[in-house]
Image: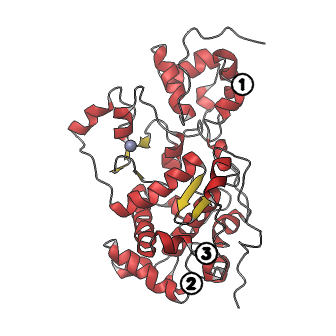
Amino acid sequence: MTRRRLPLHPRPLSGEALSSWLLRLARAYRLDLHTFLVRALGVDVAGVPQGTLDLSPPVGVIETLADRTGVAVERIQAMTLAAYTPLLIDALRPQPGLFRTYVARLGVLTWTDARACAPVRDLDEGRWLPWITADLLNHEQPTGCRRCLVEDAVPYTRLCWRAGWMASCPVHGECFETGYLDERDPSWSYAWKPAEPAPPALTFVDGLTLSAVTTGAVRLANGWLHAGLWLRLLRALVDELTRPTRLLRGAAYGHVLHAWREAGFAQRAVHGAFPPFESLAPDRRKTVLTVAGHLLRHLGETELAELTLGQQGRRLPLLPAARAPAMLHSNRCRPELNGPSLGASTNT
Ligand SMILES: [Zn+2]
């Protein structure tokens, strides 16, 4: 049954997270978010787990929102992390074998066989999803770039800030902050919490990722890399940087140690076994991404473009520039991970 349209309904903004839009809707009625959910959408907030609005909204929320605002169901679904499946994330339902499929069968620096076979400390395959971290799903303490909000005509939080693949804003060179994005005037927060400049290595890697998640591709020296492949390679590189160094082979050991030292961390930092990246505290994730940025900058864009996956003699499957626009915002265009140019490890 169609219910009466809400008289005020600010439209969703480009790249906006569902929780951000809901908050703006609630504010239009001078209500807090929970009260708005109950009164306008009939959602029992007592049964809504914290941090699920952008991951898996309660049943009926999207349809009711569409009904009451006139915004298409598909447009609202695209404001949740489901928009990134299967292009950037295989699925939003944890499943056995997902870590191996998404992370451990790809290698940037070395063969994948050792990582694929070695257990990952504290990996819970019943809960693990690539790049998804509980702290970033907390819409009551959102994380993101304050400067973006200051410059927004209408401040809003972005969906791409809800996953752990970036820790800074490459546009403004500031590290992400938590807890200051829900202010009506975000510029106020700088009075008591100055901006933390992002290390150049971090903005470098975050710039590539921002391109991936907003345009569907990463531009390298001699072509375009599919966004889905970039995110999987970056996650594989993070794995190489954080797994025990005994799993590294050949030149990878030197590359990894050099990157950690260049980022200002002791060699011993890489000898231990880390839990999965998604289980790390935000500052630790920022450190790991910074080290990844150091390593990628050390390789250089040209060498990066000529990377062979896992040093197995298989070149990255770059697409010519003319094909890049076809990938933009296409959730159906998943990278072909089993193709002849991107096979699994065949170490000998
Ligand atoms: Zn920004």
Q: Position of residue 51 (x, y in %)?
A: 55, 40
Seen from the viewer's position, the closer of residues 318 and 279 is: 318
User: Residue at the location (77% across, 68% down)?
Assistant: 338
Residue, disc 2: 247
| Residue 90 coordinates in the image, percent (x, y) | 70, 55
Picture quadrant of residue 99: bottom right
Describe residue 194's horizontal placement relative to residue 83 as left or right. Answer: left
Instruction: Give the residue at mark 1.
Output: 63
Q: Is residue 200 above or below residue 72?
A: below
| Front in this rendered view, residue 31 or 110 | 110
283 lies left or right of 9? left
Q: Position of residue 75 (x, y in %)?
A: 66, 30
Q: Is residue 226 visible?
A: no
Quadrant holding the N terminus: top right
The kind of secondary structure element at disc 2 is helix
Residue type beneath disc 3? Gly
Task: Say which mark, if any, is on residue 107.
Answer: 3
The structure residue drawn at horizontal position 50% and vertical position 39%, both measured from the top left corner, is 158
**Quick check: which quadrant has ligand 1?**
top left
User: Horizontally, is 147 left or right of 47 in the view?
Assistant: left
**Label 1 vs 2, first from the N-terminus:** 1
Instruction: Using the rendered view, name the quadrant where residue 299 is placed.
Output: bottom left
